[in-house]
Amino acid sequence: MYTSLICIYYTYCVSHNSEVLPAIRKTGSYSVSTNLTFPNRALNIAIECLEQAGLGSNLIQSWKLDQYIKYSSDEEKLLLEDAKKLITSVSVIPDRPMTPTEVGEALARGLGEDTIIKARTINLLLIKHGLQKAVQKISKKSGKKRTVYDITELGKQYGHMEVTTARHSDGTFVAFPRWFMSVVDFLANNWESE
């Protein structure tokens, strides 16, 4: 987020440098006229930076409305504020990805179980329902077998692969499946068959 704001500020300053410095030299200060409309170029640069930062479209549109509200008449402000309320009322907060252990805890709570469902059981259920697959890899250093899980095409609607900063012995980054809350609902709906 800070990188985006710095990008916006720097780009805006560079693009208005020819306007600002002469005004400071001439009058000793620089101020923006309140009669100015919102600078569309700056808005486009800001939106591009926010999109590159990975912010969701609802958040960007809400921010964009905030910027227009600052430069609008009172009548326009009412309309824009109503639009912003509508956007924020339907905005969905994305799931925080969960480990199989956390999925097991959430599933146990949802099913009213007294004991936590172990990560191993969750991994086996995810494989059984075609949401992930197990791949056997052999460590180049130790020669030991280890099981690595990968999300299938069907599983991508319930989770994603998360890359960590750790590396395997061959230098590749370690990636683990992380699951959204929707996978808990999926497993709960299919629990009777277990």
Image (cartoon, grey):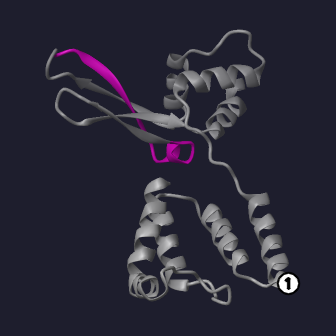
Residue with the mark numbered 1: 75
SS at badge 1: helix
In the picture as drawn, the residue positioned furthest to the left comes out as 141
Q: Closer to the camera, 79 or 140?
A: 79
Q: Which residues are magenta?
A: 143-159
Apparent side of residue 175 relative to residue 54 in the rendered image (left or right): left
Q: Which amino acid lies under the numbered mark 1 shown in the image of this protein?
A: Glu
Q: Residues within 10 Å of mark 1 (few under 14, many from 20)?
A: few
- Residue 79: x and y in percent read 83, 78
| Quadrant of res 117 | top right
Q: Residue at x 73, y 21 (%)?
A: 109
Location of residue 139 by image quarter? top left
From where the camera sits, is residue 19 visible? yes
| 51 up-or-down from 103: above or below | below
Indicate whether residue 152 is drawn in magenta: yes
Of 180 and 151, nearer the camera is: 180
**What x and y, as percent, mark residue 152?**
44, 42
Position of residue 57 in the picture relative to residue 16 (left or right): right
Q: Position of residue 86 (x, y in %)?
A: 80, 66
